[in-house]
Amino acid sequence: MISRGWRMAAVATLVVVLVVFLTPYIWIFLTSFKTRLDALADVPVWAFTPTFEHYPKIFIDKGYLPLVWNSLFVAISSTLLSLTVGTPAAYVFARYDFPGKEDLFFFFLTTRMAPPISIVVPMFLLFSVLGLTDKPIAVILAHTTFNVSLVVWMMRGFFADIPREIDEAAMMDGHTRGGTFLKVLLPLAAPGMAATAVLCFILSWNEFLYAFILVAFEGRTLTVGIPGLVTPHGTLWGQVAAVAVVATLPILLFTFLVQKHLVRGMTFGAVKG
Amino acid sequence: MGVSFNQVSKVFADGTVALNKLSLEFDKGEFVILLGPSGSGKTTACRILAGLEEATQGSVFVDERDITGLPPRERNMSMVFQNYALYSHKSVYENIAYPLRVRKIAKGNIDSRVKDIARVLQIEDLLDRRPSQLSGGQAQRVAVARALVWNPDICLMDEPLSNLDALLRLQTRTELKRLHDDLGHTFVFVTHDQEEAMTLGTRIAVLNEGELVQFDIPRRIYHEPATRFVAEFIGRPAMNIIEGEITEGLFKADVFEVPVTGQPDGPVAMGIRPEQIILKDGPTDEAIGFELDMLELVEPDTLLFVNKGNASMVVRVMRDVGDLVRGSQIHLEIPHRFQHFFEIGDGRRRL
């Protein structure tokens, strides 16, 4: 039993954490309904007459709606691509031994160690040689570079959690190695894949730098659209907030959908019977 | 016809020799036990037969067909794993049906076959459950059902009983034996438990340090152990072994002396099973005097730990020992026909 005192302390801590995390979000949410005057008020205004002008203004009049589709397309594509490439690799890392295995595995992690800003210029040059700049494919590939390593790292843990005997039972039951992977191990690792997919999606959806450098016009994502609202006449805070609120919606949705799997996935016990 | 290992060796990447030139032959329909302590190579032998492990050298034949290089799915064998290895995302029914589905058995046949084998193993009530809702004993039955449902040539079992508690282990053991008697499948059963081996096996292959020590029916394994290792591994408590020397029909170790017959002179290890020593009420011509060091009650039997000089032995008596206490002098007869003699060096049985 946890004592009463500890319980109270735990609850208090959670409340503090919640306040710290939620305040900016609530602030942005309220700002998206404030007039320009209210938004810039010196003493923050809590009670105000809401205005609904920002949402239609930014998404319809200024044509930001396609940016939402671009972001979705990029995030989903990059997630699928990362899973397709990374999951079999993770399986190999979890099940096979080969010389230099751990070094190679670590190498996957090092791709995330370099600051993105140092990679983005060479990447831009590469894509312009290939003629891919200003196309969503460039951003998808760029996002895949960091998501693949995430997939390999997370999925290796999930596969390692599945007893080897399951593979062997599947092979005795008549599967090839490939069949074992596709028909038995993938379904068993599905909760882990869901959690990994959500993380990939969020990372890609939120990513700014690569998207900003690699596409300028047609393929712009939502994050890249926001700086456009910093105008010579001042920052349009209401519209920035409206875009930000919309930008958090898919993340909220996905997180709630896979919450159970996410927790199970992060604690790496996903398939123990 | 049957299964044969031809000089099969397995050396792991780290240099461990798991199997050293194993040669073993048995027929279809047998219940073969691979018995040995950990590291004896018994599991490796089983996995090589299954195709889950590649032999470094040698070959394996089933019905005169060389299966050495075949993947598991082409060997017509099934396996029951120590941890059962059930698919946790499928129902019990689907677990049992799975090998039939993978092997593309006609859909109409699947249902009746699953239900038939479920009836044999008395798990009909569990078919809708998930593996996580099963007890150890139930999971074990499901694993056996999955292994037998498609009538494989050989069913391999890698220590399938060792995760069960003691009572359940005994029950399941009896059921496995009945299953074998009724269905006539070929079983290869890996265990380190000599009692399991003795009760289940039609023949037992005793392995030690990667080598086959003896392959025989349980009776012969018990009565004519081929080496000192087998003698001590089979039977509980273990066979008493006393090292000494025979001179002119008399075995001598320190002050312990016993007459023997038909044995040439020389250094030797004499073995006698605890349950084959006879406790006498008083001194007789054949009896030897010992000092009682310890006494353990294993109802209904009694274990007596006795000494004579440097020689010490365990005796298992199946009767009331009355007022014997530590330090008592007792008289034991060591019958000629139960004496075993092994070479001191390599432990081989003396003829």
Image (cartoon, rainbow, N blue to C red):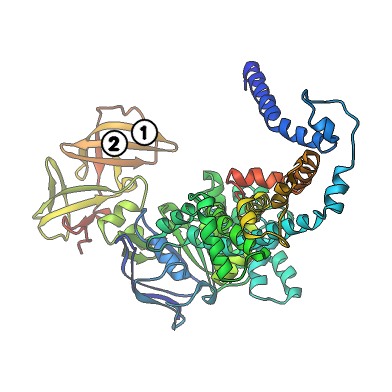
Q: Residue furthest bottom?
A: B64
Q: Quadrant of residue B87?
A: bottom right
Q: Quadrant of residue B192?
A: bottom left
In the image, is residue A172 above or below residue B332? below
- State yes or no: discs 2 and 1 in contact (Cβ < 8 Å): yes
Q: Earlier in the sequence, mark 2 or mark 1?
A: 1
Q: Going 69% across and 62% down the picture, which residue do you hit?
A: B94
- Say which of B62 and A146 sits in front: A146
Density class for disc 1 (Cα within 10 Å; few <14, some 14-19, many ≥20) is few
Please name the amino acid that badge 2 sits on.
Answer: Phe
Tell me, yes or no, if residue B218 can be seen here. Answer: no
Left or right: where B119 falls relative to B211 = right
Left or right: where A62 falls relative to B348 = right
Q: Secondary structure at mark 2?
A: strand
In the image, is residue A259 above or below residue B7? above
Image spot of residue B239 (x, y percent) = 30, 49
The residue where tag 2 is placed is B305
Q: How many dots with numbers?
A: 2
Q: Secondary structure at mark 1?
A: strand
Please name the amino acid that badge 1 sits on.
Answer: Glu
The residue where tag 1 is placed is B296
Tell me, yes or no, if residue B214 can be seen here. Answer: yes
Q: Quadrant of residue B88?
A: bottom right
| Spatial separation of the CA atoms under disc 2 and disc 1 | 8 Å
Image spot of residue A215 (x, y percent) = 66, 60
